[in-house]
Amino acid sequence: MLQAVKSTTWKVFAASMAAGQVLSPVLASAHGHPPFTPELLGLRIVLGLFLGAWLLFSAWTWRRLARMRDAGGHHVYNWGVLGWGVPMWVTLALMNAADEAGGVGNLLSGEFAGALLTSELIHFPLALWGGWFFGVVMAGVFGTPQRNR
């Protein structure tokens, strides 16, 4: 059992690192930077590794908070993660991407698409954990209804 968990964890880790290495030049191109230059190769590798680690953290966040729904924290999950975290994630991503692209008039530009992808990746786990905190506070303030048995 432990061996299977270790093997799966390393496969997910390797996949997220590979995704980071692939997405790094794509995001750079979307923001108007050349994808590969010899001067920036080290920076691209570090950025790709960080992006892979961030994707791994995002996946871990989603799995961790989704388990809460089954473990008796369904009110925190529904009120906080789904009710506050997901709408905040979408709102922050759209607002930051529109600001980066130069306003609402540039919504169909490639710069907006790249900024939206970047903002979605950055804000996803942050908004979900903010939603978890909001749900915990709301469950503490209003109490959690008793389940019918």
Image (cartoon, rainbow, N blue to C red):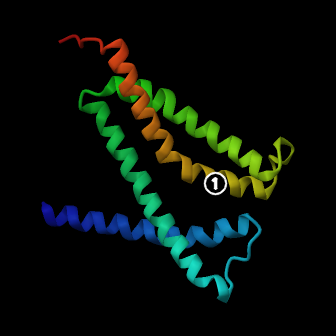
Q: Position of residue 20 (x, y in %)?
A: 51, 68
Q: Quadrant of the C terminus?
A: top left
Q: Position of residue 57 (x, y in %)?
A: 41, 55
Task: Please state if 55 lies on the left or on the right of 108 as rendered.
Answer: left
| Residue drawn at the location 29% of the way across and 39% of the way down | 67
Classify 10 Å Cα crowding around label 1: few (below 14), some (14-19), many (20 and above): some
Residue that protrudes farthest toward the bottom in the picture: 38
| Residue drawn at the location 68% of the way across and 69% of the way down | 28
Quarter of the figure with residue 47: bottom right
Task: Please state if 51 lies on the left or on the right of 73 as rendered.
Answer: right
Give the vertical position of 74 relative to 124 (above or below).
above
Q: Quadrant of the N terminus?
A: bottom left
Give the vertical position of 116 relative to 41 (above or below).
above
Task: Please state if 7 lies on the left or on the right of 108 as rendered.
Answer: left
Give the vertical position of 147 relative to 111 (above or below).
above
Q: Position of residue 90 (x, y in %)?
A: 60, 38
| Residue drawn at the location 43% of the way across and 24% of the way down | 79
Residue that protrudes farthest toward the left in the picture: 1
Q: Position of residue 136 (x, y in %)?
A: 36, 27
Residue beneath disc 1: 117
| Residue drawn at the location 81% of the way across and 49% of the way down | 108
Please state which amino acid type lies under the numbered disc 1.
Leu
How many numbered discs sit on the rendered protein?
1
- Assign a secondary structure to mark 1: helix
